[in-house]
């Protein structure tokens, strides 16, 4: 759920993060002043994929999981901090995707 925000400066992208993103950096990150951040679109990170799930509802997953910024790595899936994000943003996500409160993103799909 860390992936949802309307703020353009939501997830900081450090120099190390930019290097890790490699060729993806320009697509998924942008500069505001002298600092880089993940691009946000439609209320969530541009790297978050939203697709219909096999069993109904929607699947959410990070398309750059192996290359995601350190901030994303630091929010451990299922951690207390993650649970806090889920609780704080569930209503916003449900508004974007009615009837759905998604789990944190899983890794990339091939
Ligand atoms: S985990 Fe992936 S989709 Fe979520 S904010 Fe980080 S880079 Fe974006």
Image (cartoon, rainbow, N blue to C red):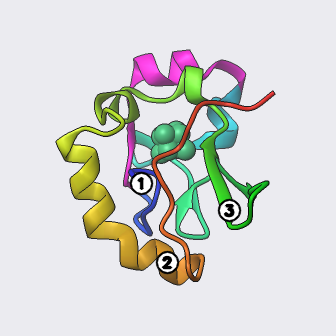
Seen from the viewer's position, the closer of residues 31 and 24 is: 24
The residue lying toward the viewer, choosing from 7 and 103, is: 103
- The image position of residue 77, as x and y in percent, is 36, 36
Q: Is 54 displayed left or right of 10 in the figure?
A: right
Displayed quadrant of residue 107: top right
Which residue is painted at 62% across and 44% down in the image?
Answer: 61
Query: What residue sits 31% from the left and 39% below the top?
Result: 78
**If the image is split into quadrants, where does the C terminus sit?**
top right
- Furthest toward the front, the residue is 55
Density class for disc 2 (Cα within 10 Å; few <14, some 14-19, many ≥20) is: few
Check residue 13 for magenta coloring.
yes
Main secondary structure type of the part rendered in magenta:
helix
Instruction: Of the two numbered discs 3 and 2 on the same chain, state the one appearing first in sequence.
Output: 3
Question: Within 10 Å of the Cα at label 1, are there few (<14), some (14-19), or many (20+) other Cα atoms?
Answer: many
Q: Name which quarter of the figure residue 85 lies in.
A: bottom left
**Residue 47 on the magenta segment:** no
Percent coordinates x, y for residue 41 in the rendering: 61, 63
Which of marks 3 and 1 precedes in the sequence? 1
Q: Position of residue 28 (x, y in %)?
A: 62, 41
Q: Indicate yes or no: mark 2 CB to ligand 1 under 8 Å.
A: no
Q: Which mark is residue 58?
A: 3
Q: CA distance from mark 3 to mark 2?
A: 11 Å
Q: Callout 1: helix, strand or loop?
A: loop
Report the magenta residues as a range. 9-23
Q: Which residue is mark 2?
A: 94
Q: Secondary structure at mark 3?
A: strand
Instruction: Please tell me whether mark 2 sits on a helix, a strand or a loop.
Output: helix
Comes first in the chain, label 2 or label 1:
1
Number of the front mark, 1 or 3: 3
Q: Quadrant of the N terminus?
A: bottom left
For disc 1, the marked residue is: 1
């Amino acid at each position: 759920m860390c992936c949802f925000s309307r703020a353009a400066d939501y997830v900081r992208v450090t120099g190390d993060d930019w290097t890790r993103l490699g060729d993806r950096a320009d697509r998924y990150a942008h500069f505001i002043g002298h600092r880089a951040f993940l691009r946000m679109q439609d209320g969530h990170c541009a790297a978050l994929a939203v697709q219909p799930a096999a069993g109904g509802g929607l699947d959410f997953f990070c398309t750059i999981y192996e290359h995601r910024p350190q901030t994303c790595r630091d929010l451990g899936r299922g951690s207390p901090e993650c649970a806090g994000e889920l609780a704080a943003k569930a209503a916003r996500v449900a508004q974007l995707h009615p009837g759905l409160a998604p789990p944190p993103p899983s890794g990339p799909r091939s």
